[in-house]
Image: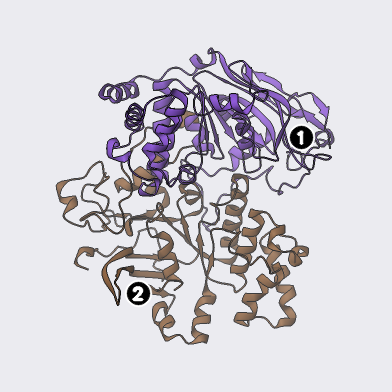
Chain colours: A purple, B brown
Amino acid sequence: MMSLAAETQAAAALPRQPEAAASQAPVLVSVENLHIQFPPWNAPIRVVEDVSYQVRAGETMGIVGESGSGKTLSSLAILNLLPPPARIAGGRILFEGEDIAAKSQREMQKLRGRRLTMIFQNPGYSLNPLLTVGAQLAEILKVHEKLPRAAALQRVEELFRLVGITDPGPRLSQYPHEMSGGMKQRVCIARALLCNPALVLADEPTTALDVTIQAQILDLLEELKQRLGMSMIFVTHDMGVVARIADRITVMYAGQVCETGDKHAVFARPSHPYTQALLASTPRIDKRYAVDAEGRRERLPTVGLAATPGQPLGGGCRFAGRCPEAAPDCTRLVPQAAAIEPGRVVHCLKRGSAGVPGHG
Amino acid sequence: MAETAIAPVPEPRQRTSRKPLLSVDGLVKSYPLNRRGLFRQKVTGEIRAVNDISFSLDEGETLSIVGESGCGKTTAARSILHLVPPSSGTIRLGDTDVCATFSRDRRPEVLALRRQMQYVFQDPYLSLNPRWSVRQILSEPLRVHGLVPPAQWDGAVEALLERVGLPAEHADRYPHEFSGGQRQRIGIARALAVEPRLLICDEPVSSLDVSVRAQILNLLAELQEELKLSYLYISHDLSSVRFLSNRIAVMYLGNLVEIGEVDEIFARPGHHYTAALISAIPVPDPARQKPRDAISGEIPSVVKRPSGCVFHTRCPAALPICSRQVPPLAAPDGAHAFACHNPR
């Protein structure tokens, strides 16, 4: 156990691997043309439309979007955990080469919590308030690895130490309400790592936390990724967080993918009009905003975001109603993926995408 | 109160000698901690939500109060409006003594004071009555304050809507028919109905989507310029603070730890907590990721406030003196004040 903690510190001190290394790794998860629908089934609401992306082994994919962009639903689909009326209406999700959507719940139960795990937004809601944290984490090891109780608790304690929980032994017998938000999120991270997962899905894991605690959790996730080499899908609405934690980024808007690519490329050369508008309008902590002699303040550029979204789903490009570059075809044709650079894909008729008629 | 000996804050250099619109001096808000017995309850201690803070706000200026949850920023803002009565301290708005006016409780005086300062709430879903139309919501302050004869309410409501960028035709809609950003516009319009001089904005954009945030921030900037409003902007989001503020006050565990001009504080934070807070914010640019001044540990409980400097338990530069003596809020260069024994 001591060595585990020591190794973690050593791993943190190691120089960063170059970004390019991850792009050679094998593909772990491949989401292909995923459609997710809600009832009424005679005129379904297409909340996720034709979403495709891949996550390679050891890579962190950041999925960015606002509320309603489908970022959470498309990642829940990977765990086969869509909330009841929602259905996968097309496409497939390959995890280690096997189609998740075709698996039975029994087969999924063997994967979930073991190979595929999740860290939720609100750690307060995702822990059982009636069980000590030690007991509820040990149960996972009992189910998946058939470990006896003592060995399971010992492993949980090791994991607590790994995720930076001070005094891990006594913590095992604490209930969630006895812990702070940041500490509970560390417990949730430990829970996600218990069985050496291949993929961790993190859905806004720092949104409910204070900024200094958020910074600690982001540091921890980065360090664990280096140390354990798992892949991560990190869902967030915060461009700053994604710039820190992700290797590659998928930007989503109203259920469609806008663009996908290496984070450095997406931030340096945003291609889709929505990504451009979003980056331009985000206030920045590292920018000095000018105020003139009469006290007039510089404005945030909101081109492309001025109107509120009101476009019915299912037409063409769903951003067309707010897009400063929209052409008549944009509301009719759904833009397909167009490669603009190696490893970068954009969905926009104005950036060379082919268009297919929408369902609307 | 021996613990809270705080040196007077000298006025910053850049500011003119104008009289401040709002001045807060020695504001304290404490809540008693009770142990409930069978027949009586015993006061066993107190929680100091706001611990002796002083600042002032000029006409047309934005002062932001920043800090993490539980630092007392919202309680401080609510004390100024007497939504929670302060325990001690003086608050002046122009020439009026706010605390004295509220404790005299004479309706015309209280209304005259409330008219000058209004509040924009954090959550536009909770702060608008769902059973009232926008017209009712916006004419309520006109009715209460009697500023406009009832025959002109409709015109006033439409003017307000247009002022905040909503079509006048939407006056008869209900809050559920609007998006979060539009609701926040209605909340701002309601605050503007009585033509206040001071708006207290409590995290007005933190519950909004990123693409809507910029529009509301621009609206606030525009309204400030056109109506010469002063803002007390409460937020934990330092990026929007950087955009909207002239000055910043940083709070930690009820104490004011640093106050100064916005660009000065971002460039040269004096207090270690301010530096940690700034470096904790992820920059939306992977090419400009800076090394962080990480602080470990978590915010201590307000019930058991650390002795001396409240930040010493997490401070990377704590000295032995820090746990014994409260550092005074001092301004070495006359403008930018911070409370630290071992400044950066």
User: Horizontal placement of B18 versus B54: left or right?
Assistant: right
Label 2 sits on a secondary structure element that is strand
Question: Which one is in front, A152 or A76?
Answer: A152
**Circle 1: is it few (<14), some (14-19), or many (20+) Cα within 10 Å?**
many
Count of number-bearing discs? 2
Q: Give amino acid for label 1.
A: Cys
- Quarter of the figure with residue A203: top right
The residue tagged 2 is B90
Question: Which one is in front, B245 or A89?
Answer: A89
- Quarter of the figure with residue A34: top right
Q: Which mark is residue A317?
A: 1
Question: Which one is in front, B127 or B336?
Answer: B127
Residue B123 on image: x %, y %? 56, 58
Mark 1, chain letter? A
- Residue at the image position 46 percent from the left and 38 percent from the top: B282
State the quadrant of the C terminus of chain A.
Answer: top right
Residue B310 on image: x %, y %? 26, 54
Q: Give amino acid for label 2.
A: Thr
Residue B295 on image: x %, y %? 32, 40
Q: Is residue B251 shown above or below A233?
A: below
- Residue at the image position 43 percent from the left and 28 percent from the top: A142
- Quarter of the figure with residue A182: top left
